[in-house]
């Protein structure tokens, strides 16, 4: 008979004449192997599907996997059919045989789609098992209906239903193994794949052989045989060759793709690692192509120049170069073109850069060169030198001050010696003149007596003439005053020399307990020329403030900087002839010494108060200030001495600097301070 609809056995039928079939064991085992290989191919392809994020690629792998697995199941079916031998000749309808592959492909697509998911609910797992089992059953029974033989094929209803249940149960279990064991840390990927492939092969083979047991063959005539039929051996060979090629292609493709994916992942990981290294580097990294367009601009570079990365990438690097330095960059590029990389590549250059606010700043630039696919690129390692230059300026100023201090100390010493004996001589002259004045008074009395007695009148007249010429009365009155003023002046010189020696003495570079009141007095004396024409200095020094751990020279520098700034503010702010006031007050507050330095100057505008301690910031005209004084003061007080320096200011009223220095610091534990 030819193929037709399914027929089932009923109780009224006589099955005693049914044909008895047998199975070829090697072919049965081969069918199991084919089914397992098809399952293994499906698992490999499902991994490729899940590992690809592109929809188009997933569809391609799903289609390839569906064809490969469908052909594998179809091959298993026909190998299983060839393993079954009946005592009558059997052929196959080619059209129905080809149609029977479609349910296998559809079922395989469903299975692959299910297996490619990263998560799977119980309901979806059962649905996938039902659809896969149903597709396997449809493929099997459609394939059996392609049989052309002199017999009628019937099915036991119970075994028929059992075959469908077997297909569903084993298919569901195979999917569970795929997802369940993958979450177990004890199961390796290969073991999971082999176990799941074996169970899936058993699902296909179990359904097939259960369905074969459900079939009954009654002798009969071939009715309406097709024009063309396929010999079983020919069909088996053709199906086996086709499926072998397809399965081998699928498995090899997945293995190759997995390795390529691994290489791609490694490259991506390497690229990401390199990108992260570049982005998190502490130095600015900027790459440009051979046309000058920026192709890399890391986070540090963005922080240095003030731009966001997308604002620079793709633009010309000249946006980062100030006009004043463009010639220097062009000269460097010209030297590179003429002499190659010697002296350019790998060498640190100190140039200038331009921030997003057009502010020019110093930078160091080290250039490297690379070539990728014939395209040259230049990478610059950029460091902002603003802080370094500020520190260098501070150090240079400190060195100058130290040199001046040493020179001043020497000069003070040289002045002190003659000043001492000049002072002593003035004291001697003053005391001697007092004695001489008494003698002159006696001479005057003697002349008067001679005149009254008429004795030695000629000599007395000459003496009177000389007194008149030299104005002896004036001299006796003015010389003592002149000598007193000279002694006061010499004492002033002595005080200034002593203050210079105290101020400029290098002392220890470690913190030592010092009398800050004495230090303040010396500093005010030394700086008198800065404030004497514009201010009166008032000192309110608490005698309880003593033994404050400080580096004396650095503390003196802080007071000097603030006093000089106050004097300059008073000079620039006063519009009348009246002098301003600079008041310096010391107090003890708990374990700290407090120093307040107030002036009655114009005050500091609110807009710039937060910037007054910034290096190089100044409101003075060109050549009148470096912008380092208050920056140095803050560095000394905060960084070197662990104190605080605050400012309060009111425009039109004045400014107050408040310094707090700890009084309980152990000098031996502090590092040497350097301005």
Image: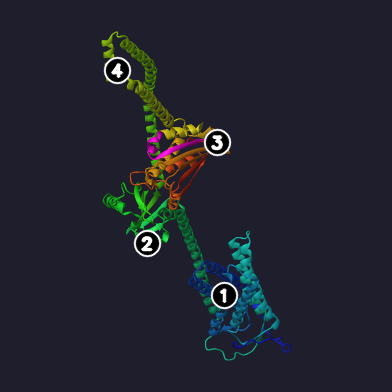
Q: Earlier in the sequence, mark 1 or mark 3?
A: 1
The residue carrying mark 4 is 467
Tell me the distance, in whole angstroms, between the alpha carbons under discs 4 and 1.
143 Å
Disc 2 crowd, CA 10 A, few/some/many (<14, 14-19, 20+): some
Lateral position of residue 334 relative to residue 668, left or right: left
* Residue 467 percent across, percent down from the top left: 29, 17
> Residue furthest toward the bottom?
224
- Closer to the eye: label 4 or 2: 4
Rate crowding at label 4 as few (under 14), some (14 to 19) or many (20 or more) other CA atoms within 10 Å.
Answer: few
In the rendered view, how is the structure colored?
A: rainbow
Apparent side of residue 418 relative to residue 466 in the rendered image (left or right): right
Q: Earlier in the sequence, mark 4 or mark 1?
A: 1
**How would you rate the neighbour count of disc 3 (Cα within 10 Å): few for under 14, some for 14-19, many for 20 or more?**
many
**Residue occupied by mark 2:** 314
In this figure, which residue is indicated by the disc labeled 3? 663
Disc 1/disc 3 C-alpha distance (Å)? 84 Å
Q: Which residue is mark 1?
A: 108
Q: Is residue 443 above or below residue 604?
A: above
The segment highlighted magenta reads 526-542
539 is within the stretch colored magenta: yes
Q: Secondary structure at mark 4?
A: helix
Q: Residue at x 49, y 67 (%)?
A: 253
């Amino acid at each position: 008979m030819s193929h037709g609809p399914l027929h089932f056995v009923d109780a009224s039928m006589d099955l005693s004449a049914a044909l008895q079939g047998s199975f070829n064991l090697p072919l049965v085992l081969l069918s199991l192997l084919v089914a397992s290989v098809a399952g293994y191919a499906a698992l490999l392809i499902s991994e490729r599907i899940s590992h690809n994020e592109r929809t188009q690629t997933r569809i391609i792998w799903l289609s390839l996997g569906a064809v490969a697995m469908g052909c594998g199941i179809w091959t298993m079916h026909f190998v299983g059919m060839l393993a079954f031998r009946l005592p009558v000749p059997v052929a196959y309808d080619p059209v129905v045989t080809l149609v029977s592959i479609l349910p296998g492909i559809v079922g395989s697509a469903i299975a692959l789609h299910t297996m490619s998911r990263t998560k799977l609910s119980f309901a979806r797992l059962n649905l996938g098992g039902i659809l896969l089992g149903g597709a396997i059953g449809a493929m099997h029974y459609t394939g059996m209906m392609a049989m052309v033989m002199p017999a009628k094929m019937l099915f036991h209803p119970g075994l028929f239903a059992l075959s469908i249940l077997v297909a569903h149960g084993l298919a569901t279990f195979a999917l569970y193994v795929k997802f369940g064991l993958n979450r177990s840390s004890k199961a390796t990927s290969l073991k999971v794949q082999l176990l799941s492939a074996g169970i899936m092969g058993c699902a296909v083979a179990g359904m097939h052989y259960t369905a074969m047991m459900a079939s009954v063959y009654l002798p009969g005539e071939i009715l309406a045989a097709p024009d063309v039929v396929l010999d079983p051996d020919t069909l088996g060979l053709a199906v086996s060759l086709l499926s072998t090629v397809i399965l081998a292609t699928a498995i090899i493709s997945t293995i190759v793709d997995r390795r390529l994916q691994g290489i791609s992942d490694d490259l991506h990981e390497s690229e990401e690692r390199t990108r992260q290294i570049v982005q998190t580097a502490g130095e600015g990294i900027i790459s440009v192509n051979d046309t000058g367009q920026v192709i890399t601009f890391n986070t540090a570079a963005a922080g240095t120049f003030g731009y966001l990365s997308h604002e620079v990438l793709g633009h010309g690097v000249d946006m980062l170069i100030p006009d004043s330095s463009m010639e220097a960059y062009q000269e460097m590029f010209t030297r590179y073109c003429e002499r190659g990389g010697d002296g350019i590549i790998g060498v640190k250059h100190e140039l200038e850069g331009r921030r997003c606010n057009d502010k020019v700043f110093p930078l160091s630039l080290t250039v490297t060169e690379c070539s990728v696919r014939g395209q040259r690129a230049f990478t610059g390692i950029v460091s902002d030198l603003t802080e370094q230059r500020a520190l260098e300026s501070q150090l240079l100023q400190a060195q100058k001050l130290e040199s001046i201090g040493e020179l001043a100390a020497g000069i003070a010493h040289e002045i002190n010696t003659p000043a001492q004996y000049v002072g002593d001589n003035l004291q001697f002259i003053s005391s001697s003149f007092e004695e001489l004045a008494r003698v002159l008074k006696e001479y005057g009395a003697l002349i008067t007596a001679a005149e009254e007695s008429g004795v030695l009148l000629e000599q007395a007249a000459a003496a009177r003439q000389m007194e008149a010429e030299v104005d002896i009365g004036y001299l006796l009155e003015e010389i003592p005053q002149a000598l007193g003023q000279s002694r006061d002046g010499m004492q002033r010189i002595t005080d200034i020399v002593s203050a210079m020696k105290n101020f400029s003495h290098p002392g220890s570079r470690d913190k030592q307990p010092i009398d800050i009141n004495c230090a303040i007095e010396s500093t005010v004396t030394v700086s008198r020329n800065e404030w004497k024409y514009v201010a009166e200095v008032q000192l309110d020094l608490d005698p309880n403030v003593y033994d404050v751990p400080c580096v004396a020279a650095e503390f003196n520098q802080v007071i000097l900087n603030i006093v000089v700034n106050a004097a300059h503010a008073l000079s620039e702010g006063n519009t009348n002839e009246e002098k301003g006031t600079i008041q310096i007050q010391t107090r003890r507050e708990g374990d700290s010494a407090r120093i307040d330095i107030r002036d009655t100057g114009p005050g500091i505008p609110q807009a710039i108060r937060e910037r007054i301690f910034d290096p190089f910031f100044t409101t003075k005209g060109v050549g009148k200030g470096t912008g380092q004084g208050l920056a140095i003061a803050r560095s000394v007080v905060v960084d070197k001495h662990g104190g605080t320096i605050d400012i309060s200011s009111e425009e039109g009223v004045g400014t107050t600097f408040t310094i707090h220095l700890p009084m309980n610091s152990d000098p031996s534990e502090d590092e040497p301070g350097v301005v």
